[in-house]
């Protein structure tokens, strides 16, 4: 066996051991057993809210431990194969070692990536709000293109989706929309999407066929649970407006004032919900969205304080600096302004192939924090 393959195997074993220790593999295995015992005890489901939280924690633990168990077992198998190769090297053993390394490498990269999602809110569902910016009809069309991109990405991952509100543009596209993405680490994956997204293309809405620049702002916030420490006086701190729901149709659409818009007076944060069939349900959903935005604002304020101590610009949120450029004509590329990742295939990105950009942002963010 050549030295390069041996070094690769040794490096992989060291990475897996480091992950096992840093993620407290043994401790999480013990926690998994404890939750399973709780679920089997009498009266577990008497308190539905508490039980659901335990079920959610069990799901997150399994999602983390399953690939980690695969890595630990794979590392042990690799050690055995290396012993065979050292004792009596054969072409079959070398091929099996190479196949094992290739299989483990993919899982190892995924688990190492997930360790970047270490904040408590990273594991939560995500609200994704998209709002058309400068660019007229092109901006409204661009906002809808982004909405479709996030929907396709979520569907590819197997995440559940719920459209909470959508307001169509006058000619095409949307003025704004809010999507709830439900899945493990949905917020952690998507949090770097907050900011302005810029599109450059030959406008289909311009008879002269001139190149047009359009902007849309994306805001990603975590769906926090009911035990959050955010306090709001709904009568004094929030202005509520009701209106008829707009959209593709349905018995309740445009017949009753079921849609709700909430404005937090101090921060001027605005949320809307029209998806539910009653005003009461929309109000409850909108309040939950507003609490999530206030929670996100706290996180951003903390990040801004830390960044200011390092002398950095800290505005990265909704409507902030342009974080990504999508150029369709005359060149074709997508470039992230933070990680500087660039691809020459913008159409595949717009079809939901976002993972390289999401991963590059997280690596960039981790690198900035360690500087």
Image (cartoon, rainbow, N blue to C red):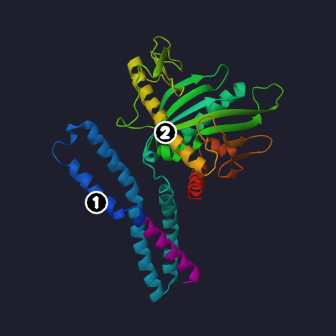
Q: Element type at marker 1?
A: helix
Picture layout, residue 192 above or below residue 28 = above
- Residue 120 appears in view: yes
Picture layout, residue 70 above or below residue 53 = below
Give the x, y percent position of residue 314.
61, 44
Q: Residue at x 79, y 45 (%)?
A: 331
Q: Which residue is mark 1?
A: 30
Q: Which residue is mark 2?
A: 298
Give the x, y percent position of residue 17.
43, 70
Does residue 212 appear left or right of residue 118 in this picture? Answer: right
Q: The C terminus is located in which quarter?
A: bottom right
> What residue range appears in magenta?
1-19
Say few, some or many: other residues with alpha carbon within 10 Å of mark 1 (under 14 / 14 to 19 / 20 or more): few
Residue nearer the viewer, 208 or 132: 132
Give the x, y percent position of residue 24.
37, 62
Q: The N terminus is located in which quarter?
A: bottom right
């Amino acid at each position: 066996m050549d030295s390069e393959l041996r070094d690769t195997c040794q490096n992989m074993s060291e990475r897996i051991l480091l992950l096992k220790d840093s993620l407290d593999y043994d401790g999480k295995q013990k926690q998994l057993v404890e939750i399973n015992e709780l679920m089997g005890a009498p009266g577990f489901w008497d308190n539905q809210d508490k039980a659901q939280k335990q079920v959610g924690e069990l799901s997150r633990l399994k999602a983390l431990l399953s690939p980690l168990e695969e890595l630990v077992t794979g590392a042990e198998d690799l050690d055995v194969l290396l012993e065979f190769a050292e004792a009596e090297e054969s072409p079959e053993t070398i091929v099996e070692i190479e196949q094992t390394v290739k299989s483990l490498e993919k899982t190892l990269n995924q688990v190492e990536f997930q360790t970047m999602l270490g904040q408590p809110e990273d594991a939560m569902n995500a609200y994704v709000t998209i709002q058309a910016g400068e660019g007229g009809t092109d901006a409204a069309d661009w906002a809808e293109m982004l909405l479709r991109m996030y929907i396709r990405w979520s569907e590819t991952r197997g995440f559940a989706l719920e459209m909470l509100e959508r307001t169509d543009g006058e000619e095409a596209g949307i003025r704004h929309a809010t999507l709830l993405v439900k899945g493990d680490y949905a917020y952690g994956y998507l949090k770097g999407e907050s900011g302005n997204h810029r599109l450059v293309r030959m406008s289909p809405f311009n008879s002269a066929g001139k190149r047009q620049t359009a902007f849309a702002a994306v805001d990603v916030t975590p769906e926090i649970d009911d035990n959050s420490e955010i306090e709001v006086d709904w009568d004094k701190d929030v202005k509520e407006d009701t209106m008829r729901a707009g959209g593709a149709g349905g018995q309740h659409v445009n017949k009753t004032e079921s849609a709700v818009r909430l404005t937090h007076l101090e921060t001027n944060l605005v949320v809307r919900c029209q998806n539910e069939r009653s005003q009461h349900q929309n109000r409850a959903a909108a309040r939950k969205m507003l609490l999530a935005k206030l929670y996100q604002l706290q996180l951003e304020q903390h990040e801004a304080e830390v960044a200011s101590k390092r002398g950095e610009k800290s505005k990265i949120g909704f409507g902030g600096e342009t974080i990504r450029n999508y150029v369709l004509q005359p060149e074709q590329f997508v470039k992230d302004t933070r990680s500087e990742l660039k691809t020459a295939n913008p159409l595949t990105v717009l079809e939901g192939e976002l993972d390289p950009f999401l991963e590059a942002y997280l690596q960039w963010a981790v690198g900035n924090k360690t500087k």
